[in-house]
Amino acid sequence: MSVLEVKDLSVTYKTMAGDVPAVRGVDLRIDKGEVLGLAGESGCGKSTIAGALLRLHPSGTKIEGTAMLDGEDVLTMSPGRLRAVRWFGASIVFQGAMHAMNPVKRIGEQLAEPIIVHKQADEKQAKVRVGALLEQVGLPARRMEDYPHELSGGQKQRVMIAMALACGPSLVIADEPTTALDVMVQAQVLKLLKELQNDLGLAMLFITHDLSVLVEVSDRLAIMYAGKIIEEGPATSVFEDPQHPYTKALAAAFPAIGDERFRRAPSGLGGDPPDPMAIPSGCSFHPRCPSAFDDCSSVNPPLFVAGEGRRAACLLVEGAHAGAKETTA
Amino acid sequence: MTMTPTAPPQQPPPPEPIPPIKIKGQRSIAWTRRKLALKRFWAVYRRNAMGMAGLIILVIIVVLALIAPLIVDPTDLDPALAQGIPFSPPSTEHFLGTDNFGRDVFAMVIFGARISLLVGLAATLVTMVIGAGVGIYGGYYGGRIDSVLNAFTNWFLVIPWIALAIVLTSLLGPSLFNIIMVIGITSWAGTARLVRAQALSVRERPYVERSNALGASNWHMITRHILPNVFPVIFANTVLTVALSILSETTLALLGLGDPNSISWGTIINESFEAGALSAGYWWWLIPPGIAIVLVTLSFTMCGFALDEVMNPRLRKR
Amino acid sequence: MTTAHPDVPAVAVDAPVLEVRDVHVNFAGRQGLIASIMGKTAPSARAVDGVDFSLAKGEIVALAGESGCGKTTLARAIMGIIKPEKGDVLHEGTSIRTGNIRDYRRRVQMVFQDPTAALNPRKTVYELVAEGLRVHKVPGNEEEQVASSLSRAGLRPPERFYLQYPHELSGGQRQRVVIAGALALDPEVIVADEPVSSLDASVRGEILKLLMDLRADLQISILVITHDLGLAWTIADRVVVMYLGRVVESGPTEDVLLRPMHPYTKALLDVVPEAGGTDRPILQGEPPDPTRIPDGCRFHLRCPVVASGRAAELGIEDRCRGEDLALRELGEGHLAACYEADLQYPQS
């Protein structure tokens, strides 16, 4: 059975300026022990999904669709049940987590908090568990007496991971967990995440804009643009053989060193990801697409099959245009 | 179906009407944009109940102060020429009663607004000039200059202003000009501190570094970058400072250090005390100027808070 | 949408456009009041600890390293924003300490990491681009110069952008405004500090392409500070790798990135994420801090060659731990500071 199954999720924020459709109909599925990578840039809605899965958005936000976590729909749970599920069923590792810690409390106290809140253990037992958690993320147990400022950036991120694992969740959502870190530290943290995920059989939703990082840790990839998923499939095959023009452009931003195609040949898209309040008609990507043609401005393509286990939302992918040559600007 | 590739257009922001290509044209249209910004500011301010209440009260008081010479008969203010019976309570003839010389209290309160507001505004000007000057100079240049100026500021902050004000006024004599200067000199330190903190923060911003990298002089960076970004803080602080200055003037007047030749709310209250109004129960003489002071202070404060909320969107209630 | 760029080799001139000679920048240590009364002095941070390199006309050099290696401090020392303790920066042979600093600021411009923060939010695009012209009182028609800079930076038609404010533009457009502001002064060198790291990934290529075009069309030399070796691969002619305030390896991009000599460069290349998982050797720990620089080769505490025992086998371990070393040219224009590399590439 899948750990997470999301169907037709839509999230609309209410602001003074009007309704902002951040997520517009997303389907996701993560099985036990699987890592799904969710890639996209600013404004695509990926972080919104993370918040929506634990209902962390301000009241008044319109959320539609279903999100089944271990068989229960998170979006329609009663507040009591929701509180029990938060951290216990699914937890989040936030971006900039180093700033998410209370600077005047010791690490051990903060780690023990979710354990005690969920009545998993009393204080003494919690302390033991905290020690074990720290060891699991590669820090000596005695560091639980330290304050956050005594740790380095990478160490703080490890503590955040430990915190996410504190109640033994079935799903861990990692939202840009390595973005603020140096490459070397990033590699260490990624390695740690992958090991933990393997050892504990976790399901993980890994959200980031850095495609190369995703390719390294994910089993499957989903690419988001303007609130929708526009391509998905096995990680390596999506990265090495992207079908959607946006995925191609995104992949080109992370060239492999040594690849002659990218030597002295930077490639990028003009314009910017669309403002969720002003999404273009038809295919939301068409104003920036190098391969766009007439129909693209009026037809909003659904996800078509694009190979073994792969789907992409592009008219070019739909069999009808197979055989026509793709022109580059 | 043929496939005609469309060249990827730049994502166009809604285009502004293209102005004639003349520099003068640019500048005047930049002014139009500033006017638009002011309109937007007003639209937000209007929705702030506290700010509007404060503003209305303030406008009424200022208008009354301005037209005072037109509605008040000067004989009502002159101790030698006043017609009323001294110490009479409020009546139809004398709306708020009379004082020890038979002067109309209502007339005095309205007229007193002129001096109180004048002193308040002028003293604030002095405070702002000294405080902002010291704050920006120290905050921008840093180092030894800042250490010296900061020590200087702290010295002034720590001295109880009343003590200093009493000494200075006694030395200089209680003319209106001196009072304004004394209040300014004793109040600038608070503003300087605030401005210095803001200047320090703005100085570190990347666009100031960019200006430096472009080769700008210190004067350029101070006037073009630091000052405009410190201005909102100064402005909000100014509004509150006026209230405080008016209170300061009142305090000095109550201590007998007010200008004996001018009528301000403080001098009215002072004279009433000296004539024993409190024990004799001449409430109509004592209370109205007090209420006036409270109203003005309150209205300035309310406007100040509203300004803070408008200019710093994070403070607005969701 | 890739456009292959014509190979533009660096043109050798008599004096390199910029030369950095043995630059040292220290930051005084901070300590409490009591400690200073007791006469203790906190160790200063040696952010840049003796760096030499040069930039030729029309060349693009990537200055790479992790955070804390001193690359940002070095960039600011080159710009003249920070004064080095020791050493000098020469512009066309003249030291910037003695030369005309205003003129230098005109000819060497900077592009910043965060374009949103680098543009005063209260100024219009026109004013932001014209600022440099006004500061230096450049003669000529200001409006024409602004228009031409905006066009050159890819913002066309320029008139449409005159009255925009930075917050109305996209990230890529803001960076173009910063670049236009730099171009208005007709610079010879652009120092770009992480020019694309705060931009959306799909937009980065456009800005990088712009930098390459500026080099091709105007022969502007570009020094790019970055932590991203992929970026260096994309646009740089040469790569200079820094660690803890020193250059540990430098040379043509192909050589440094495909045939690295220094263990640190190798480690950096190893951790670039790629398909196939996390099974590569990763350096442990965090870079030591610049207030306590190790003796000998400053990298030896984290060096896999020392850790694996190979250094002992080769008989160089003592030197790694005890003897500081300088860059040596071990290949054509390819320099490295490593005892093991010395052995592998003996100088003829």
Image: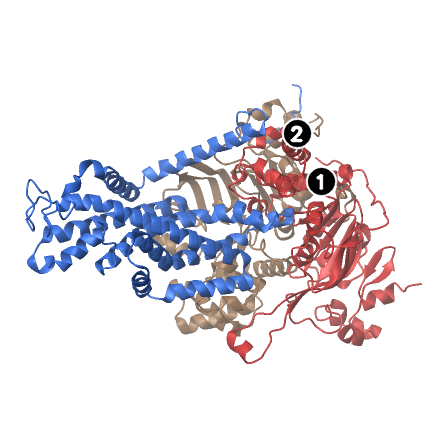
Relative to C340, does residue B294 appear above or below in the rendering? above
Rendered location of residue B171, percent (x, y) = 32, 63
Q: How many numbered dots are placed on residues in this image?
A: 2
Colour for chain B in the figure? blue
Q: Please state which of residues C325 and A19 is positioned toward the viewer in this rendering.
A: C325
The amino acid sitting under disc 1 is Asp
Rendered location of residue B191, percent (x, y) = 40, 55
SS for dot 2 = loop
Q: Which residue is mark 2?
A: A291
Q: Residue A86 occupies which quadrant of the picture?
A: bottom left
Q: Please state which of residues C325 and A159 is positioned toward the viewer in this rendering.
A: C325
Query: Residue C186's mark?
Result: 1
* Subunit that carries the residue with mark 1: C
* Subunit that carries the residue with mark 2: A
SS for dot 1 = loop
Same-subunit check for callouts 1 and 2:
no
**Direction front: furthest residue:** B80
Observer able to see residue A222: yes
Rendered location of residue C156, percent (x, y) = 63, 30
The amino acid sitting under disc 2 is Ser
Instruction: Report the quarter where the C terminus of chain A lies.
Output: top right
Between circles 1 and 2, the one closer to the viewer is 1
Dot 2 alpha-carbon crowd within 10 angstroms: few under 14, some 14 to 19, many 20 or more: many
Colour for chain C in the figure? red
